[in-house]
Image (cartoon, grey):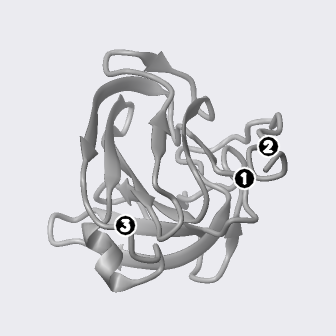
Amino acid sequence: MLWFFRDPEREIAHGRVLSPADGVVQSIMPWKDGRTRVAIFMSPLNVHVNRAPLAGTVTSVEHLPGGFVPAFNKESEHNERVVWHFDTELGDIEVVQIAGAVARRIVPYIASGTKIAQGERIGLIRFGSRVDVYLPEGIEAAVEVGQATQAGVTRLDRD
């Protein structure tokens, strides 16, 4: 249990959009509205503390109830989740923390209206789970499916 709840200090990298989660890029999907979803799967062996991908202000933190299928399944689209919106220099950035089969609790650390720094801790998902980041229109993903990410360190966008 101590290994799972570890929260190592990180030297935050430089870049417009940083990974909010330790894990592996599961998918990169364009959306009809022009955004690109980068889905990061977190196994029980990853650090599960999530971080802000950009500096800005938290404009909403919304808990949505749902199921608990494995976070790597397509059906996880209906799992319990917390949807974050950040007002940033790139506009609205959406981050979604998704509970998995074992993860039954998402713990937000900060509330709506809070100003945050890039790489600041925003919350924890207990055990296996997924975090999705929606890159704004015109921002190209710099990561690839299968690539390992580190919260606050791996850059998700390309210049």
The label on residue 37 is 3
Please report whichever mark, 3 or 1, sits nearer to the chain's N-terminal start: 3
Alpha carbon distance from label 1 to label 2: 6 Å
Please report whichever mark, 3 or 2, sits nearer to the chain's N-terminal start: 2
Residue 61 appears left or right of 15: left
| Residue at image location 63% in from the left, 35% down from the top | 119
Amino acid bearing label 1: Val
- Asked if the residues shown at circle 3 and circle 2 are in contact, with their CB atoms under 8 angstroms apart, the answer is no
Between 44 and 88, the one lying in front of the other is 44
Residue under pointer 1 = 47
In this rendering, does residue 142 appear at all? no
Amino acid bearing label 3: Arg
Q: Secondary structure at mark 3?
A: strand
The local crowd at label 2, few if under 14, some if 14 to 19, many if 20 or more residues have their Cα within 10 Å, is few
- Asked if the residues shown at circle 1 and circle 2 are in contact, with their CB atoms under 8 angstroms apart, the answer is yes
Q: Secondary structure at mark 1?
A: loop
Amino acid bearing label 2: Arg
Quadrant position of residue 50: top right
| Residue at image location 32% in from the left, 21% down from the top | 112
- Asked if the residues shown at circle 3 and circle 1 are in contact, with their CB atoms under 8 angstroms apart, the answer is no
Q: Secondary structure at mark 2?
A: loop
Up-down relation of residue 134 to residue 63 (above or below): below
Residue 128 appears left or right of 72: right
Please report whichever mark, 1 or 2, sits nearer to the chain's N-terminal start: 2
The percent coordinates of residue 104 (x first, y second) are 46, 55
The percent coordinates of residue 45 (x first, y second) are 76, 65
Quadrant position of residue 7: top right
The percent coordinates of residue 57 (x first, y second) are 38, 22
Alpha carbon distance from label 3 to label 2: 27 Å
The label on residue 61 is none
The label on residue 6 is 2
